[in-house]
Image (cartoon, rainbow, N blue to C red):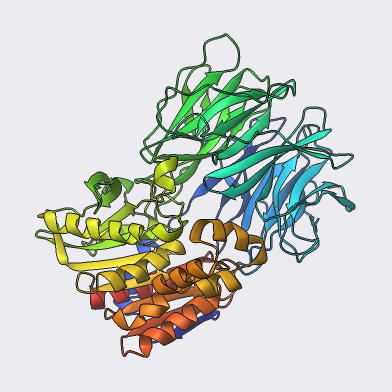
């Protein structure tokens, strides 16, 4: 019997090529693993201890209201496309501004949702890309970046969201890496970030009235990564994260008069990945990334001692925000045994509260496997690590097949988060899942982060060889049954691994992956191209172009002998659909079997539940047949 809602019908917006029918029995068995939910904290109401979250009850995540811990999730938006994020208007809270694109294009538009009427008003032009909507402290203005001027540069704009026609460009910029960080307390100045690469960024201040832009971060002679930044309560200094003083991003302060960075976390040997300043300006809540897991800490901006760190489940924290009364910090927390949920912490007492408890499809969360951290040395003795999920040896004795799942980015990081559908691989197929953090991954210092740049690109592929050696050394893992999969840059790594280790990998699944660096750089969206050149290399240099062509998977398609599954969204603005199509054609030309799945209503990955469910079920069939 097929589980209700699961049929063998292909969703209408999927193009299926070479993929066999999904057995009804497999659909029924996997159905429990498809019906999980999650809840992402979005913000506090400014006048009441209530919050909005993003969660899904149908096909796409939408905004919901939660009035109390454990309370009902009251749905606010009912839209066909996923809502990407939103926040209350400061002070009054009578409206929410949220972001949304159509079909995965990432051409995000800003919308105002009026709580009194439920009316939704689009605030932006409907065609350009708008990101980083940030409210002024008084709630009267909204700052954001937009590509409206030429489609490539992210300029800074400001509007009164009650009057969309008031939207105006404050400061034109060059490049696609600009972002609004904060408003000054008096509403006269914007703090803006300029991202050049994962290792190099700057902070600027912009006069809202004149558009005058002034760089705040001095040149040091070396690249410095600066991410989150906010004004102090009095507006005379800024708090920011920077790796200027060491390998890791430290949280510190910088007076606007001296422009000198003073670290507040020099004794913590990990990245501070996010932080939030309390409304009274006396306390910083910050999250450190400690070997992949998050830790919430508090720092004092005065001479007073800070609150003690709260005790939280081990996992990954995101989305910090203080309540307006300064009594609570809200955030999202996910772990291997729990979907993402909304939580809060009371800094004065250390008490933590779980506001939502998302469903795991009726499964017992305690049945989900906790990962073990694995550490090894690569071909050049560089230490690398990863997370390994091993199935129950009592249920699945003997050496188990392994799925190596490689993150994207390439500056991403695999972390111990909820495995969602992937729990089926471990609990039902009896496959181990290994998430490597190869060189170039973030979280392990700025030197490690830069080790795969430019001509060093294939060193990260050699790291996969070290993980294959690790698998062979484990008595519980089967080195003759290894699959590799990954998305975006992880898709390139999947293809490259199949090329470099054809006798050690049974099959591969390339999801929205780069197949040729030259065609990728030519066809990726204009606002991304220069940013990607910094990471991968500038193809306008003949030597670099020759190198990029030499390492591109399409160049070596004849070496791929293992079955390949390619997944792509037609509207992908990052890795265009042509990357998938040319790879499918090139591999099939050498008689290697290729399955191809393309969604006409998706972009850089599948976000609609029906599409994602079909992708997972067809991947199960692929692994069952070839692994």
Camera-side residue of 134 and 80: 134
Residue located 35% across and 66% down the image: 485
* Displayed quadrant of residue 383: top left
Quadrant of image for the C terminus: bottom left
Q: Position of residue 122 (x, y in %)?
A: 79, 58
Q: Position of residue 101 (x, y in %)?
A: 67, 63
Q: Position of residue 314 (x, y in %)?
A: 36, 36
Tell me if residue 263 comes above or below residue 385 in the rendering.
Answer: above
* Displayed quadrant of residue 424: bottom left
* Visible residue check, residue 514: no
Q: How many marks?
A: 0
Residue located 9% across and 55% down the image: 475
Instruction: Tell which residue pokes out farthest to the top in this image.
Output: 303
Camera-side residue of 307 and 564: 564
* Displayed quadrant of residue 434: bottom left
* Visible residue check, residue 609: yes
Residue located 56% across and 9% down the image: 304
Quadrant of image for the N terminus: bottom left
Camera-side residue of 535 and 444: 535
Tell me if residue 531 comes above or below residue 623 in the rendering.
Answer: above
Q: Position of residue 170 (x, y in %)?
A: 84, 47
Q: Quick check: 412 left or right of 530?
A: left
């Amino acid at each position: 019997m097929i589980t209700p809602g699961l049929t063998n019908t292909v969703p209408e917006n999927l193009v299926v090529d070479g993929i066999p029918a999904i057995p009804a029995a497999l659909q029924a068995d996997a159905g429990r693993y498809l019906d999980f939910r999650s809840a992402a904290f979005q913000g506090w109401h400014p006048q009441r201890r209530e919050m909005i979250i993003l969660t899904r009850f149908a096909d796409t995540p939408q905004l919901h209201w939660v009035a109390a811990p454990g309370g009902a999730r009251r749905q606010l938006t009912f839209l066909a496309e996923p809502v990407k994020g939103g926040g209350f208007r400061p002070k009054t809270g009578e409206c929410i501004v949220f972001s949304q694109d159509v079909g995965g294009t990432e051409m995000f538009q800003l919308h105002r949702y009026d709580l009194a009427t439920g009316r939704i008003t689009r605030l932006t032009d409907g065609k350009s890309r708008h990101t980083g909507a940030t409210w002024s402290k008084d709630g009267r203005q909204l700052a954001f970046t937009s590509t409206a001027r030429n489609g490539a540069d992210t300029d800074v704009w400001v509007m009164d969201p009650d009057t969309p026609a008031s939207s105006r460009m404050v400061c034109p910029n060059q490049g696609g890496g600009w972002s609004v960080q904060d408003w000054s307390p008096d509403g006269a100045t914007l703090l803006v970030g300029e991202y050049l690469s994962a290792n190099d960024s700057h902070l600027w201040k912009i006069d809202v009235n004149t558009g005058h832009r002034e760089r705040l971060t001095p040149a040091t002679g070396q690249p410095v990564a600066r991410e989150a930044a906010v004004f102090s309560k009095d507006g005379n200094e800024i708090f920011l994260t920077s790796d200027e003083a060491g390998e890791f991003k430290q949280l510190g302060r910088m007076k606007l008069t001296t422009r000198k960075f003073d670290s507040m976390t020099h004794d913590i040997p990990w990245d501070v990945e996010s932080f939030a300043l309390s409304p009274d300006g006396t306390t910083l809540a910050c999250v450190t990334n400690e070997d992949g897991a998050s830790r919430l800490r508090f720092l004092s901006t005065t001479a007073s001692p800070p609150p003690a760190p709260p005790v939280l489940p081990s996992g990954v924290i995101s989305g910090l925000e203080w309540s307006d009364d300064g009594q609570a910090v809200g955030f999202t927390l996910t772990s291997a045994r729990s979907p993402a949920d909304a939580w809060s912490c009371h800094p004065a007492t250390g008490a933590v509260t779980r506001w939502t408890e998302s469903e795991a499809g009726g499964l017992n969360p305690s049945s989900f496997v906790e990962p073990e951290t694995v550490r090894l040395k690569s071909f050049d003795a560089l230490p690398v690590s990863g997370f390994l999920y091993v199935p129950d040896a009592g249920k699945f004795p003997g050496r188990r097949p392994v799925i190596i799942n490689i993150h994207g980015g390439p500056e991403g990081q695999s972390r111990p988060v909820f495995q969602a559908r992937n729990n089926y691989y471990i609990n039902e197929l009896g496959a181990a899942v290994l998430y490597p953090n190869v060189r170039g991954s973030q979280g392990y210092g700025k030197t490690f982060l830069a080790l795969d740049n430019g001509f060093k690109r294939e060193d990260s592929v050699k790291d996969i060889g070290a993980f294959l050696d690790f698998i062979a050394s484990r008595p519980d893992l089967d080195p003759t049954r290894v699959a590799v999969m990954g998305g975006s840059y992880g898709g390139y790594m999947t293809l490259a691994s199949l090329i470099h280790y054809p006798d050690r990998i049974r099959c591969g699944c390339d999801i929205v992956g780069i197949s040729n660096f030259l065609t990728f750089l030519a066809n990726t969206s204009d606002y991304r191209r220069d940013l990607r050149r910094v990471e991968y290399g500038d193809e306008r240099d003949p030597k670099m172009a020759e190198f990029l062509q030499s390492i591109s998977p399409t160049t070596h398609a004849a070496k791929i002998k293992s079955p390949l599954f390619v997944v792509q969204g037609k509207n992908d603005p990052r890795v265009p659909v042509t990357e998938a199509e040319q790879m499918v054609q090139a591999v099939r030309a050498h008689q290697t079997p290729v399955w191809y799945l393309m969604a006409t209503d998706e972009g850089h990955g599948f976000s609609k539940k029906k599409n994602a469910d079909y992708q997972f079920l067809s991947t199960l069939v692929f692994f069952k047949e070839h692994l």
